[in-house]
Image (tube, helix red, strand yellow):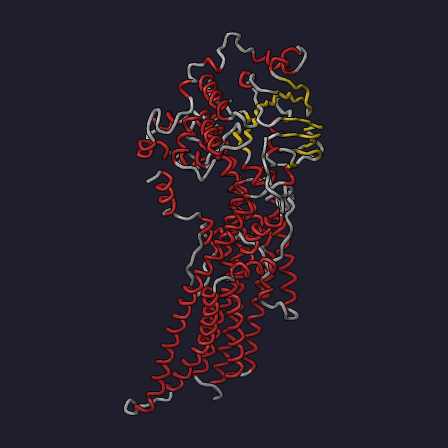
């Protein structure tokens, strides 16, 4: 079985990434946000605003309008603050309203192309409606049973006793049926929910992968990944909360008020309505007051995550300077601020809960007193007071969750705002409706290129480069002169301010990014590897390559023998960013990856800077064979490696200062190239690459020739 097949089989059985997974569990009450975020109760209050009034009283005057206005302002302030913290505003992100996000969610979660999935949603809603209607009539059935039993029938009168028994039996059946409907609708909707989260998560990663190079360099990866992770976890929660708790609770409140009005009179209905209204109003006002506390808590959580991520990512630097205590001190300082902010948030939450309980207890007490008076007056029965208490307690439980949902929906929607805002960030490098690049000779030309990373600092000042197809050219110059920037413009990480970059006469702006980058292979100075095995990292250059081609590329890059000496061979995991490998090993893997890609244009950005002289000469000789008849661009500080270049461009202060081959440039004793060459003081008697004893050893060999056969490698 080929190594790649065995590896794919192993990968398919592994767990899905966390941001693609979602909980399918559901209960009669929504899961607390702390459970979704995996934090302690004290962090429950790291909450955000949204537009919940839109699922409540959007069309109702008075309180509904006040809810809408207040929450809109509340949401906008916090969402804007979060965007600013993540530099999304600077990147050009636009504000998105809560209602707009809910519309997108409805579109994404509605299975448009699957009738069976649509039926799942329809049946789920029918079950939900039936569950709520049946649920509010359970206290009515129970009250009738109590009144029937209160009449004091004898056990011998079976015909009469049968009525209350039947009512009690109906009460039990109704309770069981309600629970069954609740669990069934949860199971039916789970697949729909998971599919929606999967699609949204995939679109988020797709959007991030196609973001401009500048977006990724200007973002704190730790803070951004934390915000995106929260957004993904909120997707399923927001949809479930809106469908299964918000709208059903409004329906249940309406039904309870009508039953109370019909059975007990308008006064009881008015008490229930007033209690609900006061509860919602109080919750809204207190939540607005708490905004500044949980906004600060969320900001500090992002900072703590970014600080920890940065410390771990740069752990080598931390250890070089022995600054573990300094990193812990900085992290602990943020955690202390977070702790203080969380304490304030928790305190305000206690005030909110206390007020909510006071409102409900007052409403319930008044209702019970009036019911007791009605019984003494003979206008009501024991069953009626039981029904009123049961309905109000049932409504109390549901509205209690509405208070939590109100807060958590706001947090969920603003957590999601990061995901939606990413969609609005404009891309400076566009390739919509572009044609594919057609490479014939591979000629590259920079025409009067001007560019800078900041508007007030121009780095390249009218650069002209003419690189014939199939030639080998080098770009040299002092540090910061713009050498690597030219390569970034060639591969379209950026577009020039003025001028153009052309390949075989085609402006790179007019061709698709995919076709452009498929024809260009790059080995950067700092080769970044995935936290996977060596085989995958080499094969990343061409995911359709065979095992034999992967091994041949490794041999050509002079890394195969070193891999085979490792205990796990090609299965060896390289660690995050390749931390388990030496700098030379990483660069050779990068070269192997490029050779496997087999591009028409080859770019080396200090690709051999981490190699010893012998290995460098061996690889350069192999590259000379592999890159023959390919356009090759090399950025180098070590001038010994580019002596055989057909043409050398010397960049100085954003201009092309000199052009020529090695010998021609050395004739100009006043030129920058001569100064750089003299500073490096190459040995006059150093053997050339063609005389290196390691060259013959590192030549590209057929798959079944030297060292080990492919079959032997597979078994390793």
Classify the position of the N terminus by image quarter.
Answer: top left
Residue 124: percent from the left, percent from the top? Answer: 46, 68
Residue 155: percent from the left, percent from the top? Answer: 29, 89
Q: Give above or below for 154 relative to 133.
A: below
Q: In this rendered view, identify the residue nearer to me: 687 or 75.
A: 687
| Side of 589 where 50 appears, left or right | right
Count of picture labels: 0
Q: Residue at 65% across / 65% down in the picture?
A: 66
Where is residue 351, by image quadrant? Answer: bottom right
Where is residue 96, by image quadrant? Answer: bottom right
Q: Give above or below for 282 relative to 472.
A: below
Q: In this rendered view, identify the residue nearer to me: 441 or 129.
A: 441
| Residue at the left extreme, as displayed | 156
The reply to whether residue 404 is visible in this rendering is no
Q: In this rendered view, identify the residue nearer to me: 227 or 551.
A: 551
Residue 125: percent from the left, percent from the top? Answer: 48, 69
Q: In this rendered view, identify the residue nearer to me: 250 or 498.
A: 498
| Residue at the top extreme, as displayed | 685
Q: Give above or below for 122 relative to 535.
A: below
Classify the position of the C terminus by image quarter.
Answer: top left
Q: Residue at 33% across / 87% down in the picture?
A: 162
Residue 325: percent from the left, percent from the top? Answer: 48, 31
The reply to whether residue 116 is visible in this rendering is yes
Q: Give above or below for 661 relative to 607.
A: above
């Amino acid at each position: 079985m080929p190594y790649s097949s065995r590896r794919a089989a192993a990968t398919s059985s592994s767990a899905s990434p966390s941001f693609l997974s979602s909980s399918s569990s559901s209960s009669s009450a929504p899961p607390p946000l702390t459970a979704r975020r995996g934090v302690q109760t004290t962090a429950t209050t790291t909450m955000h605003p949204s537009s919940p009034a839109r699922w409540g009283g959007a069309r109702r005057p008075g309180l509904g309008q006040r809810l809408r206005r207040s929450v809109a302002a509340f949401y906008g302030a916090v969402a804007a603050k979060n965007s600013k913290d993540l530099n999304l505003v600077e990147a050009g992100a636009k504000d998105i309203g809560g209602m707009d996000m809910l519309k997108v969610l409805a579109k994404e979660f509605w299975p448009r192309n699957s009738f069976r999935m649509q039926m799942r949603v329809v049946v789920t809603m029918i079950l939900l409606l039936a569950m709520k209607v049946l649920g509010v009539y359970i206290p009515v059935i129970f009250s009738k049973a109590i009144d029937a039993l209160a009449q004091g029938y004898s056990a011998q009168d079976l015909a009469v006793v049968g009525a209350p028994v039947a009512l009690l039996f109906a009460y039990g059946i109704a309770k069981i049926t309600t629970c069954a409907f609740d669990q069934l609708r949860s199971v039916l909707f789970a697949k729909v929910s998971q599919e929606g989260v999967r699609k949204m998560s995939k679109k988020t990663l797709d959007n991030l992968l196609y973001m401009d190079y500048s977006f990724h360099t200007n973002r704190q990866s730790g803070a951004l990944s934390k915000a995106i992770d929260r957004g993904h976890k909120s997707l399923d929660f927001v949809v479930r909360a809106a469908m299964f708790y918000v709208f059903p609770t409004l329906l249940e409140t309406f039904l309870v008020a009508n039953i109370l009005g019909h059975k007990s009179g308008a006064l009881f209905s008015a008490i229930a309505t007033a209690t609900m209204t006061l509860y919602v109003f109080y919750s809204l006002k207190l939540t607005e007051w708490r905004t500044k506390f949980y906004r600060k808590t969320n900001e500090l959580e992002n900072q703590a995550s970014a600080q920890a991520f940065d410390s771990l990512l740069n752990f080598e630097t931390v250890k070089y300077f022995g600054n573990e205590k300094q990193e812990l001190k900085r992290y602990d300082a943020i955690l202390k601020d977070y702790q203080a902010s969380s304490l304030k948030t928790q305190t305000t939450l206690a005030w909110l809960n206390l007020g909510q309980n006071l409102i409900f207890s007052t409403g319930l007490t008044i209702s019970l007193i009036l019911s007791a008076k009605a019984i003494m007056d003979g206008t009501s029965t024991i069953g009626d007071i039981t029904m009123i208490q049961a309905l109000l307690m049932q409504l109390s439980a549901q509205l209690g969750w509405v208070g939590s949902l109100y807060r958590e929906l706001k947090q969920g929607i603003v957590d999601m705002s990061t995901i939606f805002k990413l969609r609005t960030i404009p891309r400076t490098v566009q390739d919509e409706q572009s044609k594919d690049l057609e490479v014939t000779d591979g000629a590259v030309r920079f025409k009067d290129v001007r560019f800078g990373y900041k508007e007030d600092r121009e780095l390249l000042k009218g650069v002209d480069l003419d690189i014939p197809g199939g030639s080998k050219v080098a770009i040299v110059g002092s540090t910061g002169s713009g050498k690597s920037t030219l390569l970034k413009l060639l591969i379209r990480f950026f577009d020039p301010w003025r001028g153009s970059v052309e390949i075989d006469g085609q402006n790179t702006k007019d061709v698709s990014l995919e076709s452009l980058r498929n024809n260009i292979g790059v080995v950067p100075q700092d080769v970044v590897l995935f936290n996977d095995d060596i085989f995958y990292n080499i094969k990343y250059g061409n995911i359709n390559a065979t095992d034999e081609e992967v091994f041949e590329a490794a041999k050509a890059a002079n890394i195969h023998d070193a891999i085979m000496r490792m205990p796990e061979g090609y299965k060896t995991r390289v660690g995050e960013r390749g931390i388990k490998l030496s700098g030379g090993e990483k660069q050779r893997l990068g070269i192997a990856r490029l050779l496997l890609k087999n591009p028409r244009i080859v770019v080396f950005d200090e690709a051999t800077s981490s190699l010893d002289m012998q290995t460098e000469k061996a690889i350069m000789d192999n590259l000379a064979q592999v890159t023959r008849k390919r356009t090759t661009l090399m950025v180098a500080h070590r001038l010994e490696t580019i002596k055989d270049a057909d043409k050398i461009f010397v960049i100085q202060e954003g201009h092309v200062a000199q052009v020529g081959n090695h010998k021609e440039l050395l004739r100009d004793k006043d030129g920058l190239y001569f100064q750089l060459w003299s500073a490096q003081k190459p040995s006059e008697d150093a053997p050339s690459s063609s005389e290196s004893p390691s060259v013959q050893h590192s030549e590209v060999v057929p798959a079944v020739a030297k060292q080990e056969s492919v079959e032997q490698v597979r078994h390793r």
